[in-house]
Image (spheres, rainbow, N blue to C red):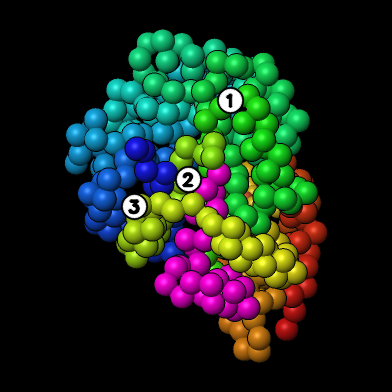
């Protein structure tokens, strides 16, 4: 039986925390090898991860070092970079080359939303991936999605040929009004699609929960990691085929592969523990950013939006002494400040979480830029 844990290649360990391209090759090889030794096979990368270098790292750490039939490789067509139909083939061939393979097991149209679905239609992306499938260069076609259940329903109705969808599902977003994980899951089930889960730990925020939430989990099971509750929540859903985890350390990989080796779905008592955690978390997280970085690319002021949001959330969860302001000032050496925002709205259009980025940046500026 397929093991339900996939290795997300968007948060590889770094040698320099301020340089997203400085991936730690040796540690990544060690992680890849252990992942495969433990019987897991699924790897998920994308054109844009690690500033365009994740696919190259996959080639070096995975493809060159392991037999092609021992792993499943997934990547994505970056709708956000497409200008015309010819870009499909150009980028796809570049991806085969960067990854060092002659086919992808799973291939997705990346990050469909109202805006990107319009691009996908204009550039004939759906017809392109079906053609690649007929040519044997793609085994299974799908798309990742960050928008309303109504739009998901429309796309799946228009494209019954699509085999799977990748959805953001985690226990905090399950019933959230902005993300609507549950309703999107239900739409995918209605269309009988395989579901792959992204952001089960919500960009890491469900692994580092506030103290009172941590106590809820540790009281229920002192041996289970906090992240394991989030991954198991997603994996327990019947129609979920795979849960992706963007692992950044060897320790995370060991933990994830431990409890997912012989996966046990959540019991009804476990579900009550999660319900309690959700109630506490909803009263605590100020800005629910997943650190996907989709907003960063187009910002004319090079503002480190997700980094500032993470600092702000930490600041609000801190009792007493905090070093967040110091970190903020350090980041200002590399990136634009929150107050540099000119409210152009580029980032808001790209944000799959529909966050009020401009307003949040004003608050962050008031919090960290005053003496
Ligand atoms: S609205 Fe502000 S943060 Fe967003 S892209 Fe424009 S300048 Fe950058
Ligand atoms: S603000 Fe939105 S787009 Fe930017 S990193 Fe956070 S969730 Fe992603």
Quadrant housing residue 278: bottom right
**Cα–Cα span, label 2 and label 3:** 13 Å
On whether residue 231 falls in the magenta region, the answer is: yes
Q: Nearer the viewer, residue 345 or 226?
A: 226
Q: Is mark 2 within 8 Å of ligand 2?
A: no
Check disc 1 and report its element: helix, strand or loop. Answer: loop
Q: Is mark 3 within 8 Å of ligand 2?
A: no
- Give the label on residue 358, or none: none
Check disc 3 and report its element: helix, strand or loop. Answer: helix
Instruction: Locate residue 238, reporting x and y percent.
Output: 54, 40
- Give the label on residue 243, or none: 2
- Give the label on residue 192, or none: 1
Q: Earlier in the sequence, mark 2 or mark 3?
A: 2
On whether residue 281 falls in the magenta region, the answer is: no
Residue 257 seen? yes
Q: Is residue 106 above or below residue 278?
A: above
Residue stretch in magenta: 209-237
Instruction: Locate residue 107, reporting x and y percent.
Output: 45, 27
Mark 2 or mark 3, which is nearer to you?
3
Q: Nearer the viewer, residue 8 or 49?
A: 8
Instruction: Locate residue 250, reporting x and y percent.
Output: 32, 62
Quadrant housing residue 322: bottom right
């Amino acid at each position: 039986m397929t093991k339900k844990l996939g290795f997300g290649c968007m948060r590889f360990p770094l040698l320099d925390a301020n340089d997203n391209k400085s991936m730690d090759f040796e540690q990544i090889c060690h992680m890849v090898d252990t992942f495969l030794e433990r019987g897991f096979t699924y790897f998920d990368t994308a054109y844009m991860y690690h500033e365009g270098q994740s696919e190259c790292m996959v080639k070096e750490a995975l493809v060159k070092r392991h037999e092609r039939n021992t792993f499943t490789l997934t990547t994505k067509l970056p709708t956000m970079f497409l200008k015309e139909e010819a870009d499909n083939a150009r980028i796809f061939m570049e991806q085969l080359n960067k990854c060092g393979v002659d086919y992808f097991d799973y291939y997705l149209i990346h990050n469909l939303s109202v805006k990107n679905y319009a691009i996908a239609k204009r550039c004939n992306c759906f017809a392109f991936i079906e053609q690649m499938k007929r040519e044997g260069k793609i085994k299974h076609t799908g798309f990742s999605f960050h928008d309303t259940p109504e739009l998901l329903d429309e796309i799946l109705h228009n494209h019954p040929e699509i085999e799977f969808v990748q959805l953001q599902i985690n226990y905090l977003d399950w019933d959230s009004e902005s993300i609507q994980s549950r309703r999107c899951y239900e739409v995918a089930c209605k269309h009988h699609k395989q579901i792959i889960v992204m952001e089960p730990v919500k960009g890491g925020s469900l692994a580092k929960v506030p103290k009172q939430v941590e106590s809820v989990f540790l009281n229920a099971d002192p041996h289970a990691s906090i992240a394991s509750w989030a991954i198991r929540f997603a994996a327990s859903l019947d129609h979920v085929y795979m849960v992706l985890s963007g692992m950044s350390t060897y320790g995370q990989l060991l933990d994830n592969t431990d409890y997912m080796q012989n996966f046990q779905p959540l019991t009804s008592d476990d579900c009550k523990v999660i319900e309690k955690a959700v109630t506490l978390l909803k009263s605590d997280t100020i800005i629910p950013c997943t650190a996907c970085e989709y907003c960063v690319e187009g910002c004319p002021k090079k503002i480190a939006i997700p980094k500032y949001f993470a600092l702000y959330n930490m600041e609000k969860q801190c009792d007493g002494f905090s070093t967040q302001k110091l970190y903020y000032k350090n980041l200002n050496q590399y990136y634009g400040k929150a107050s540099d925002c000119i409210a152009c709205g580029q980032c808001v259009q790209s944000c799959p979480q529909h966050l009020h980025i401009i307003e949040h940046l004003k608050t962050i500026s008031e919090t960290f830029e005053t003496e």
